[in-house]
Structure formats: C-alpha cells, structure tokens
Image (spheres, grey):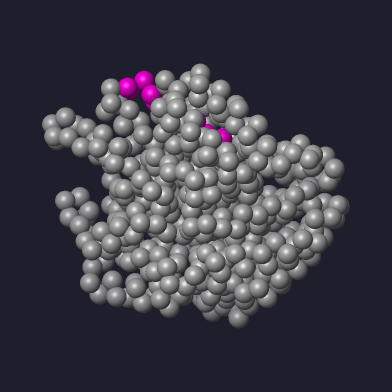
C-alpha cells in the first residue's frame, strides 16, 4: 500500500480528534504502518522519531517486547470480566503495586477507562463524600487559570483553556478559578519559587472566603501540559496541601500526563512532599498501549461510602471496561520496567542532555522561554523577547515547525507557539540532539515574517 492510498480512504471515513479537517486538504495525515522503539514508520519506509510519545502516553517505545509478552500471556487467560461482584488477579496485583509506589496514604484504587473518566470519578467522589458527611452545600470546585483536565463535560468545566472550553461554556458547571503559578509570568529577577508563593496568596484568599461551599481544588502538579507546557515550582502544591487541610477541602492531583516519570520523579507530587486526597492516573499507566485509568484515594474517603446498602451511600459509578485484565497486565509490566531498569536515574541523564541540547536557543531573539521538568522540555516562541509578546495564534507558527520536522525524520507537534519534547524513555542522547537540531531549524523557519 502507498501512503496516498490509505490517506484517501481515511479522509472518506475518519473524523480525526483535535483537528480542523479542512487542514488536510493541504496537510494530509501521516499514515503509520508500524512502530519500533522511538520510531514510527509509514508505508513507504519513511521514519519519524516520536518526540511527543504519541500524545504523551508512550514510555518505553513502540512494540516493546516485555509489554508485548505480558499482553500475549494475559490474552490466553482472561480478556475481560465484569468488576462489579467479581475480581481477578491482575487488578489486585496492580492495585497493590500502585499503593506501594504512590505517595503514602493513598490506599484504595478505583478504575476507569481514560483520563477524563478518572477526573469525572474524582469530582463525583469528592462531592459525594461531603454529601455523605451531611454537607451537601459543598458542591463547587476550584481550578487554576490555564489548566486542562480533559474534554468530557465535567472535566472540561475544570479546565481553563479557551480553545477547548469556550464553545461549550453553556453546558458546563461554574467553577472558581485561582491564578496559575506559571513561572512564565514572573517578574524580571524573580525566582520561580517566589512567584509561586506570591500567586498562592490568591488561592489562600479564595479558600478562606469560599471553603464552606468548595468540595475540592483540582490541579496539574508542576506542568500545565495542554496549556502550553507552562511550568511552576513545587512549593505551590506544598502550600496548597496545607491550605486544603486547614479549610477542609479536598485536593485532587491530576497526574494523568505528568505521572510516571515525566517530571523527573515517578510522580510530580513527590517533589512537593504531599499526598493528595485523590490522584488521577492514566496515559503512562499502560505505557501507550491500552486505555486504562485509576483514581487512588484514602481510607478516609473510602470509609465515607462504606455502609449498609439501604443507606444509598455507595459510589454507584461504573464503566464497562473498568479494571480490564489486559490493561492491568500492561500496567504491571510498565511498573516492572520502572522497578528493574533504573528508569528514573537513567532519565536524569537524558534530561540533562535534553536541556543542554537546546541551551543555545536561550539567546534567540524569538525564544521567550526555555523550561524543563525532567523529561518534559518546552521552548516558547515569541514575537518580542523583551516583553514576551506572543505571536498571534492565528499565524500558526508551530505548524511550520511540525511540517519541517516531518522532512527531518521527526514528529514534533507544537502546542501553538510552544515546541516541546516529551519522548519515550528509550530515546538515545544522539536522537535527542537530532531533535534539538530539527527544532532549531523549525523555529528559524517559523519566526520568519
């Protein structure tokens, strides 16, 4: 099959996500035949380094032999079974392993299908917890400006990225928004930590004034990924945990994109030294293989629902593929690789290489910021460096980087004006340096008038 043959068939029948389909009149979708390691390959032998981990999910490369073997073994035993009233070994093993590696105090695992579904479950759990405690007036949620938590209606309401949210605003619940600690906006000479502490003052005030009606605060620790890979200092979440305890408000940590080593530690919350009341995980949980998500929570939350059936205090929420055995087997193989292969330590070496590879861009007249947490690095293009004035979004400068990268064996998919690397952990230093060169070339092309 030629690339063009599959593209023609695709455009007749497939509606692609997060895409203005009219774009494909001039930029056809890239047909992929196979993947191996960091590489994706089309039907004509062209290869691309998957620098964005196929939407931030792939940790250990495409067609990973150890994960493939885990799938094959599980398929021969049990593909799926209802989790209501039944159980199976993979879900029990996975729950025990997740409780072992996540922050202390998280002791129960509730499974769903994807990241948005995990957020929805956590929102409902938090509200229902307070209702079961006789406080139904606690029904509002707090988010951060520029946040993103998914695109089902509850999760979308908790976001603050206009591109995704504005169209559907009439359908969404109202939430309270605190200003982000995003260090891009700090004053000249101000540290990331000082800015985060200054921004926290507004969150403190909001909680002090509204805690009687607030169920929970929902945050993406350290990186606001879909908000342009904007980053902040972990002290913000240390202070937020203290405030949530002080005002009787739950803390929901959305680690769907930032968990499993993306920020330099296994989970981003570790860098703040906190345990959230709910931790939502997906994406890297199954290393890019299968949809699976989980909400980890505490005994305190769990016990609020534990009662006789007739009280109707149970959490009656479900998904058909909850706790799918094959997905759980993949997640267990993923955790095995973390355990056996010294992944976090190896990532520190790769992250250092990543930072060094783009350091030369710091003086570029159209680079307003280079930021990094672990294995996630972003370079933000700006129209004016001194004022950090952004290019108009309508100019789609990032698209120029994307198109150039495809000619240089690289899949880079910028977020607006932000070029970022979030590669699989099996990438080599040589491949990182290649991506940096390609990004540098793409930025030069993108900023031309």
Q: Which residue is at the front of the view, 155 or 287?
A: 287
The quarter in which the N terminus is drawn is: bottom right
Q: Residue at x 78, y 45 (%)?
A: 391
Q: Residue at x 65, y 54 (%)?
A: 372
Total of numbered circles in the picture? 0
Q: Is residue 278 above or below residue 100?
A: above
Residue 302 rendering spot, x and y as whole percentages: 27, 40
- Asked if one can make out residue 10 in the rendered structure from this viewpoint, the answer is no
Left or right placement of residue 361 versus residue 84 in this view: right
Q: Is residue 295 magenta?
A: no
Residue 331 rendering spot, x and y as whole percentages: 38, 63
| Residue 378 figure quarter | bottom right
- Asked if one can make out residue 180 in the rendered structure from this viewpoint, the answer is yes
Left or right placement of residue 47 versus residue 169 in this view: right
Residue 257 rendering spot, x and y as whole percentages: 51, 53
Q: Which residues are magenta?
A: 135-144
Q: Residue at x 16, y 29 (%)?
A: 311
Residue 255 rendering spot, x and y as whole percentages: 48, 49
Q: Which residue is at the front of the view, 102 or 364?
A: 102
Q: Residue at x 22, y 53 (%)?
A: 83
């Amino acid at each position: 099959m030629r690339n063009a043959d599959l593209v023609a068939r695709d455009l007749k029948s497939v509606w692609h996500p997060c895409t203005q389909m009219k774009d494909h009149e001039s930029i056809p979708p890239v047909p992929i035949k196979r993947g191996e390691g960091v590489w994706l390959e089309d039907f004509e032998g062209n290869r691309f380094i998957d620098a964005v981990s196929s939407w931030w999910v792939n940790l250990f490369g495409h067609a990973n032999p150890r994960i493939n073997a885990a799938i094959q073994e599980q398929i021969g035993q049990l593909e799926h079974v209802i989790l209501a009233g039944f159980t199976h070994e993979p879900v029990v093993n996975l729950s025990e392993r997740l409780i072992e590696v996540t922050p202390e105090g998280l002791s129960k695992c509730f499974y769903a299908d994807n990241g948005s579904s995990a957020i929805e479950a956590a929102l409902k759990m938090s509200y229902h917890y307070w209702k079961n405690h006789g406080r139904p007036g606690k029904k509002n949620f707090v988010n951060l400006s520029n946040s993103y938590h998914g695109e089902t209606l509850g999760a979308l309401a908790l976001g603050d990225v206009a591109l995704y949210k504005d169209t559907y605003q009439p359908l969404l619940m109202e939430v309270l928004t605190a200003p982000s600690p995003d260090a891009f906006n700090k004053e000249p000479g101000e540290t990331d930590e000082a800015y985060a502490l200054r921004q926290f003052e507004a969150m403190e005030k909001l909680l002090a004034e509204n805690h009687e009606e607030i169920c929970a605060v929902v945050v993406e620790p350290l990186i606001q990924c879909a908000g342009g890979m904007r980053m902040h200092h972990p002290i913000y979440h240390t202070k937020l945990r203290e405030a949530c305890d002080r005002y009787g408000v739950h803390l929901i940590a959305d680690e769907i994109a930032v968990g499993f080593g993306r920020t330099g530690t296994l989970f981003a919350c570790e860098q703040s030294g906190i345990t959230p009341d709910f931790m939502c995980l997906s994406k890297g949980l199954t290393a890019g293989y299968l949809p699976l998500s989980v909400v980890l929570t505490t005994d305190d939350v769990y016990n609020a629902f534990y009662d006789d059936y007739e009280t109707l205090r149970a959490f009656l929420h479900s998904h058909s593929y909850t706790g799918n055995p094959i997905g759980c087997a993949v997640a267990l193989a993923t955790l095995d690789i973390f355990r056996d292969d010294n992944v976090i330590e190896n990532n520190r070496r790769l992250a250092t290489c990543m930072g060094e590879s783009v350091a030369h861009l710091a003086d570029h007249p159209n680079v307003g910021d280079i930021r990094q947490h672990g294995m996630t690095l972003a370079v933000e293009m700006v129209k004016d460096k001194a004022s950090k004035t952004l290019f108009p979004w309508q100019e789609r400068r990032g698209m120029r980087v994307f198109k150039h990268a495809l000619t240089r064996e690289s899949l880079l998919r910028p977020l607006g004006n932000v070029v970022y690397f979030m590669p699989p952990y099996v990438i080599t230093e040589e491949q990182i340096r290649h991506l940096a060169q390609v990004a540098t070339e793409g930025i030069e092309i993108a900023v031309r008038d």
